[in-house]
Amino acid sequence: MRSFDLNLARVFVLLYETGSVTATAETLHVTQPTVSYSLGKLRRHFDDELFRRTGRGLTPTAGARRLYEPLRRALADIDGTIRQADAFDPATMPGRFTLALSDLGEATLLPRLLAAARERAPRVSFIVRPLDVDDAEQQLRRGDLDAFVATPVLTSHRTVRIPLFHERYVGMVAADHPRIRGEAVTLEELAAEHHATVFGSSGHVVPRAVLATHDLLDRVVVDATRFSMLPYLLEQTDLIAIVPEYVGEVFTASHRLRLVRLPFETEPIEVALYARHESSRSPSQRWLVRFMAEVLGERVSPAQLPPYAVGPERPGRPV
């Protein structure tokens, strides 16, 4: 072990987590040849290939899988000891974090996050940027963002995806809609109504895809860029919109709207938190990721979600 450089362990852990020489080099601020040279030394030291190149990047061998957890844990212990003086105490220390959220996230998730932060981390503040799913990972890598929440599954080697909760889609209409009066809408009714949809950079493509599948795109009369305009639009018109259920629950709580079951199954979506790999985060960013996952996460599978019911007090809310 006298010949083993601790920096090699860090290279190994990052290669394992990212599956990419390029991402490892960027994280460590070194060149790709330097990472490749370190990988060669690791292979000679452990007398194992460690990683094989496949179409999905570097795939760890059985030997690498045995090494990963002990080395990761050892590095975490060392980093924790070194950073004790810089440990982030949310109760007493100020922190300013930049998040990217869709307009749905701003309307439904941000209030929960802020309420918890005011209680647990009173000196923490947030800068919220519009979510652009095409550029969010690059912003995270550049340090322009500390974290973002999105529904599309992004598979970059440079980020970690932390599932928060599952969503299913429902229909949303005005509480006094002149034709849709029951707890569910039939396909015939859906085809007879006019629709409002949202198309933009937030990543929710299911509503339009569902309408396209049933040849109903010609029934769309409003195609906007933000979901947050829907409650104001729907309570004043006879339009219908397909929205994520939790978002619909938030909107029905403050607007004259109700939710209805759709006449077909839609694949549940998973809302996830994206951040840099743990070994690349600062102490405050590590706290942020744990905090967001705890506050926003729900350990509920789609099969456990309750059925819908329409009641006189809170129309459209599950019971």
Image (cartoon, helix red, strand yellow):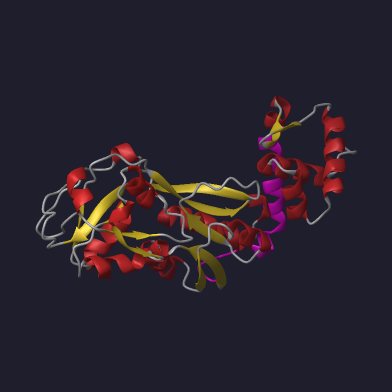
Residue 106 in the image, given as x and y percentages of width and height: 41, 66
Residue 231 in the image, given as x and y percentages of width and height: 27, 66
| Left or right of residue 25: residue 200 | left
- Is residue 145 found inside the magenta-colored segment of the image? no
- In this view, the residue in front, 211 or 38, is 211
Residue 81 visible in the current orientation: yes
Residue 185 visible in the current orientation: no
| Left or right of residue 270: residue 178 | left
Magenta residue span: 67-93
- Quarter residue 250 falls in: bottom left
- Quarter residue 249 falls in: bottom left
Residue 143 in the image, given as x and y percentages of width and height: 65, 64
Residue shown at the point (55%, 68%) measured from the top left: 98
**Residue lying farthest front?**
218
| Left or right of residue 190: residue 15 | right
Q: Would you say the magenta stretch is mainly helix, strand or loop?
A: helix
**Above-or-below relation of 241 to 49:** below
**Residue lying farthest right?**
3
- In this view, the residue in front, 147 or 186, is 186
**Above-or-below relation of 52 to 104:** above
- Is residue 83 found inside the magenta-colored segment of the image? yes
- Quarter residue 51 falls in: top right
Residue 114 in the image, given as x and y percentages of width and height: 42, 68
Residue shown at the point (62%, 66%) measured from the top left: 144
